Amino acid sequence: MKTRFFLASALLLAGCQITNTTNTVEEKTNTTNNDPAAQVAPTATTKTTPKPQVVVPKKIPTPQEQQDVWERISMQLRADIPNDQRVIHYRDWYLRHPSHLNTVAQRAEPFLYMITEEIEKRDLPLELALLPIVESSFDQFAYSHGRAAGLWQITAPTGRSFGLEQNWWYDGRRDVVESTRAALDLLEYLNRKFDGNWLHALAAYNTGEGRVFRAIRNNRAAGKPTDFWSLDLPRETSDYVPKLLAVSDVIQNRDKYGISIPAIDNEPAVKLVKPKTQMDLAMAAKFANVSLDEIQRLNPGYNRWATAPEGPSHLLLPVSKVDKFNAAFAENGHRGMKVIRYEVKPGDTLSVLARKHKTTTKQIQRANNMSGTNIRVGRHILIPVAMQDGETVAARMANNTQQSHGSGYRTTYTVQSGDSLWTIARQQKVSIDQITRWNGISKNSPLRVGQKLTLWKSSETGGVIRTVYYKVRSGDNLSTIAQRYKVKVADVVKWNQINGQKYLKPGQQLKLYVDVTKVSV
């Protein structure tokens, strides 16, 4: 399957032929013996016969034997890079922004080896290992204006079609292990649908197979070529494949372009553990002796303070911490939750108690072996609760206090006439010390009208916030947009400074700060 990668591109563009060449390096060694005692004096009847040359082939490490995963991938990239202006444009962009690839490498470090292994196991093109760079910049919490989520930017319907659960507790689109499986399943399916044409398959991954098939049919009816480069596709899709080719070119030819990317060890960084019970993430962090923030970064699929009651309950942990986790979990009797004994009071209902303790009615029923919802005053029931105040950004970021910025999401405040640090702090619900620390200024620094200040804001529910740029469509209004992304109308107005604007205009772009743990529900 690898050797057919980008075949359509090769047929269209001169010089774009896929090559599979193997260089054999040979060392030729002439051996002579300089020991006088071992030499035989020549006689008139003695002839010296030269010893045959010994050719010692130099062993070239296989991709799997490389020390760096980037090199392992680079050695297996097979796509020729067409001399197309879109490819050139995005290649130049990556070369002008080396810090972007540094950030990508830092985010990819726990996951790239695992993704590469899965792609090799399926005998798929290694270019696919770079697709999360284009899709999400390897941000496992990424969320798009089209409501696609995770490293592989999978939409909710597609996720369900490929077996990704999505509920109050868990969103499989952000689960790195499960979303990688689903994304590769989808890519294999699309490759079969398009008869092995990977460019068409990739375009369909971005815009949908129906849209690509229509473009092919239209070109065929008009007597035009049907390769990817000739199709009439949405602008985003027309740029999507060139972006992947561009980043493949840059990573494969790092020395040529004078660019370096932080190395990633070519060995497992994380390992999957599978507790057969619901697991409090804070308890898992304690068992593994890692921070709660690290548990969340490695397991972004969980929306709440614990794994899902009915599964999945698997966790990715650093390889070096797995034995420690298993030992502590066993010592705790393989219990993954803290449970309190609660006396039912007048006015209590299961739903009230579930909200109060940040759990679900079903979970309380399960803990008490109940099928109904009736509870009696004075009766004691068991309620699973978080070890920590689980749904707060502060708790999830508690072990990252060394960072100079805050947790949550970053926003920019423009200083207005009459502003002071005190009025801004009170209005934005932060402290003066935080503002000065985030912006590298002192409490006595004068503020200028129009000056931009960086502020870090927390989600009220402690979710994971990502910035989404939404393009207004015909029929949209503030209420429908706010409802779609589960934000407040007042916040949309504030974020976009549209107080005096009566109507939204199609094509207008709105900035939204979206809690990705809510929008999947």
Image: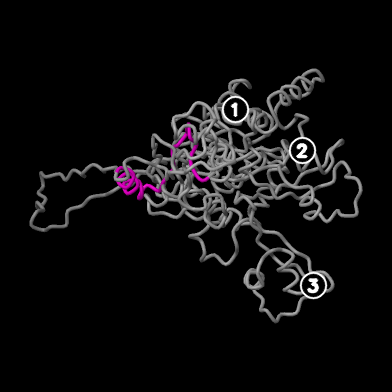
Q: Nearer the viewer, mark 2 or mark 3?
A: 3
> Does residue 182 appear to the left or right of 335 in the view shown?
right
Residue at 45% in and 50% down: 387
Occupied quadrant, residue 132: top right
Occupied quadrant, residue 8: top right
Q: Position of residue 502 (x, y in %)?
A: 92, 48
**Which residue in the structure is indicated by mark 2?**
235
Q: Position of residue 349 (x, y in %)?
A: 57, 37
Neighbours of disc 3 within 10 Å: few (<14), some (14-19), many (20+):
some
Tell me whether the residue at label 1 lies in contact with that at label 2, contact meaning CB atoms closer than 8 angstroms. Answer: no
Mark sitting earlier along the chain (3/1): 1
Give the SS element for disc 2. helix
Give the SS element for disc 3. loop
Tell me the distance, in whole angstroms, between the alpha carbons under discs 1 and 2: 27 Å
Residue at 87% in and 41% down: 506
Residue at 53% in and 29% down: 3
**Amino acid type at image mark 3:** Asp
Q: Position of residue 423 (x, y in %)?
A: 75, 71
**Which residue in the structure is indicated by mark 1?**
160
**Amino acid type at image mark 1:** Arg
In the rendered image, the vertical position of residue 270 relative to residue 363, given as above or below: below
Neighbours of disc 1 within 10 Å: few (<14), some (14-19), many (20+):
some
Q: Nearer the viewer, mark 3 or mark 1?
A: 3
Which span of residues is magenta-colored? 305-330
From where the camera sits, is residue 58 visible?
A: no
Q: Position of residue 148 (x, y in %)?
A: 66, 37
**Amino acid type at image mark 2:** Arg
**Which residue in the structure is indicated by mark 3?**
419
User: Looking at the image, which is closer to me, 372 or 450?
Assistant: 372
Q: Residue furthest left?
A: 37
